[in-house]
Image (spheres, rainbow, N blue to C red):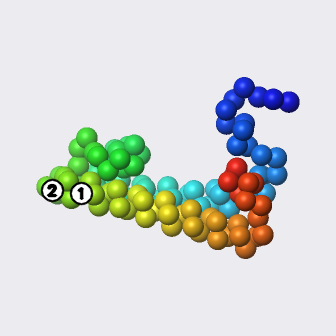
Amino acid sequence: EKSNNPKSLYLLPGREKYYKVARICYSRYLSKIIRLKVCFGIKSDAEALLGRALSWHPNIHDFGKAGKAVEHEVRSALLEVRDGFLRICQNLRAEKELVASA
């Protein structure tokens, strides 16, 4: 059965066996982003991802430097979590397409 939802192109049967690992890794990512937002006084995930906050923590005076630090930390968190997820799945002898779908 075909779906009109574009996401269905990426949701492959069998991906469910990787959900648990994906959820664990995603929760690690979220905790890193939440900590980052608190430290810098950032209100939204979008601001964190862009490294541009509408308002910063009161102790931050160099907004450009803070923005670069946030961008670096978000990128590091993404890479660390992605690499951890792929490493765990590789140890499970995972099928690449199903891992990506999870």
Q: Tell me, yes or no, if residue 19 can be seen here.
A: no
Q: Are marks 2 and 1 in contact (CB under 8 Å)?
A: yes
Q: Which residue is rendered at x = 42% and y = 55% of the image?
A: 34
Given the current orientation, which residue lies at the most extreme bottom position?
91
> Looking at the picture, does residue 93 appear above or below residue 23?
below
The location of residue 41, given as percent across then percent down, is 28, 51
Given the current orientation, which residue lies at the most extreme left position?
61
Quadrant containing the N terminus is top right
Residue indicated by mark 2:
62
For mark 2, give the secondary structure. Answer: loop
The location of residue 92, given as percent across then percent down, is 76, 70
Q: Amino acid at mark 2?
A: Asp
Q: Which residue is rendered at x = 73% and y = 59% of the image?
A: 96
> Looking at the picture, does residue 23 appear above or below residue 5?
below
In the image, taking residue 28 as reference, residue 58 lies left or right, namely left
The location of residue 70, given as percent across then percent down, is 32, 57
Residue indicated by mark 1:
66
